[in-house]
Amino acid sequence: MNRFTTSRKNTDMISKLFPFVFCLIVSFCFLYSLSSVSDAAQEQKLESLKTSVLQSTISCYALEGFYPDQLQYLEDHYGLHYDKDKYFISYEATGSNMLPNIMVIPRTEYKGGGL
């Protein structure tokens, strides 16, 4: 038995695992940041759609003198297009001279189960 030599088994194991653990950590950070960017893009699309609906509504009032009573009017006459599978637009008109209440709600996929 030689008391002055050190065992390299522990350091060899750590040096072999370090690249694997490092790659795992970097991959996790990359995926997390990618998810964060995707969420920000979804939020931006939502705000952009709400702005488009509001601008179309105000344009209609400026040109024709009334706010449309249905969203379909904006789609037919003012070129409003959106993905109806991804977004639900709540358009509640209270009168021809009052700005309608507009809410844009992202749709989520129904994953079954339930009652």
Image (spheres, rainbow, N blue to C red):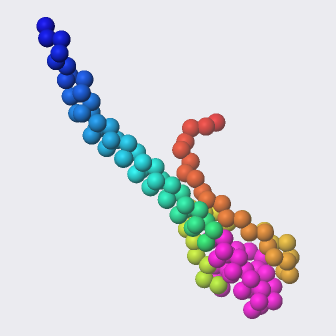
Q: How far across and down, in percent of the image, does residue 92 sit?
A: 78, 68
**Quadrant of image for the C terminus:** top right
Q: Is residue 50 magenta?
A: yes
Residue 82 in magenta? no
Above or below, comparing residue 60 to residue 88 in the picture: below
| Residue in view at x 74 percent, y 83 percent | 58
In the image, residue 102 lies at what x, y percent? Answer: 74, 69
Horizontally, residue 67 falls left or right of residue 17, namely right
> Who's the residue at 66% across and 70% down the image?
50
Residue furthest to the bottom: 63
Quarter-wise, where is residue 60 in the image? Answer: bottom right
The one nearer the camera, 60 or 43, is 43
Q: Is residue 16 visible?
A: yes
Relative to the observer, which residue lies in front, 105 or 77? Answer: 105
Q: Is residue 108 left or right of residue 14?
A: right
Q: Nearer the viewer, residue 113 or 97?
A: 97
Above or below, 22 relative to 65: above
Q: Residue at x 16, y 18 (%)?
A: 5
The secondary structure that most of the magenta stretch takes on is helix
Is the residue 36 above or below the residue 14 in the image? below
Direction from residue 33 to residue 81 in the image, left or right: right
Q: Is residue 73 visible?
A: no
Quarter holding residue 57: bottom right
Q: Residue furthest left?
A: 1
Question: Residue 62 location in percent, x, y?
Answer: 77, 89
Q: Identify the residue at image location x=59%, y=62%.
A: 43
Stretch in magenta: 49-77
